[in-house]
Amino acid sequence: MPDNRFFRNLVAGMRNGVLAIDREGRMLLINEEACRILDVALEPGDADRHFSSLLKDHHDIVRVLASAFDMATLPNRAELRLRPSGKVIGYTLSLVRDERGRPYGAALFFKDLTLVEQAEERDRLRDRLATLGEMAAMIAHEVKNPLASIEVMAGLLRRQVPDREDLRGLATDIINEAKMANAIVVEVLEFVRPIRLQVDRTSVPKVIEEAVPLAESKVPRRATRLEIDVPGGLPAIQGDHHQLVQVVTNLLINALEALDGGGTIRVGARLVPEDHDGSAAVELVIEDDGPGVPGDITSRIFNPFFTTKPQGSGLGLPIVRKIVDAHDGRIDVATSAGRGTTFTVTLPVGVPGQLGF
């Protein structure tokens, strides 16, 4: 018969988070996976603390545990988003009963579903993009020809009135607006076009080196400081060099526009150690100390055509995400109003399995 040490080791080695409390609310057990997911550091004597003290930053979990002995039906395979980390967990709450069937404790079993939710969100995004892409492509093709005609006719009109500076100015404004509208149409067509990766060995430092002048040609850097910290010896990744240059260019443009000629942009890269399936990745970070993004719109910044800029098309970040997804990578954003923005792009070193969508 296994002894208590066996069961302790069993719980400690589980890949799910496990924590248990008694009826008085004392924390009886919490394993390492639970501490990792909840970002809790155990101190000597924590076994006798009330669970609400140990989990003071996780009010929703405290609420679930506090109602464990009062609920007629306990939640099973429910989901919960943790604040402020934004992690999503799937959990099951169970009562621990004695030999007579009386509950004297409660146990919470949970698993980090954040990556699963992100994958599902990518699938939902692909579905939305497929429908939106068909409609946008049709509209863009229909709009391009009238725009070209407007630009040509405005040019003819400007030549017909060489002595009327007021009319020439109006014609010039029409031409400039038509060119701007045409640029947006071109960007829409580029966005809806399926990605076909030209995969080859790609140097991340070289990608950054080429992206910087491209971004500065679109948005002048002026007094904005640019700090690049990319260690030597980074392995080459298998990816589409030109598409990845566009990713970094768009992220740098986003940062330059946010800083408006001031502040600092930091660009870094590092090798992420192999995970449980033996795959390694390169993590690229682009951080600015600008105004950040308010929390109520953070979840929408990757939505096509969503923008807070008066002249923006709202396609820069969606294009970035589309390219990263095509590389089987991941893009994460950390931002809040007044505290800057950090984009983290994680790209596998191996060959992407997805060749476009």
Image: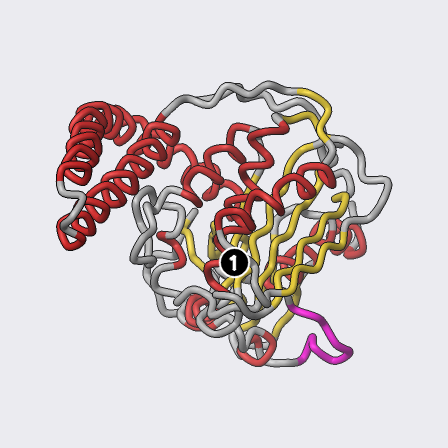
Residue 196: x percent and y percent? 50, 19
Q: Residue 126 falls in which quadrant of the image?
A: top left
Under tag 1, what secondary structure? helix
Give the class, few, some or many, for how many residues have Cα within 10 Å of label 1's Cα (few <14, many ≥20): many
| Residue at image location 16% in from the left, 50% down from the top | 170
**Disc 1 marks which residue?**
256
Instruction: Assess whether residue 185 is covered by the magenta stretch.
Output: no
Q: In this view, does 320 lie to the left or right of 143?
A: right
Stretch in magenta: 40-48
Q: Position of residue 330 (x, y in %)?
A: 56, 40
* In the depicted structure, whether residue 291 falls above or below residue 331: below
Q: Quadrant of residue 281?
A: top right
Front-most of residues 140 and 204: 140
Residue at the image point whose x is 69% and y is 25% from the top: 238
Please state the horizontal and vertical placement of residue 124, each as a whole percent of the image: 35, 35
**Which residue is at the far right?**
233
Q: Is residue 303 visible?
A: yes
Residue 252 x/y as whole percent: 55, 51
Residue 133 against residue 319 in the figure, above or below: above
User: Which residue is at 41% across, 41% downward?
Assistant: 318
Q: Magenta segment: does it hold 47?
A: yes
Q: As shown in the figure, which amino acid type bears the numbered disc 1?
A: Leu
Q: Which of 231 and 212 is in front in this view?
A: 212
Relative placement, left or right, of 136 versus 91 is: left
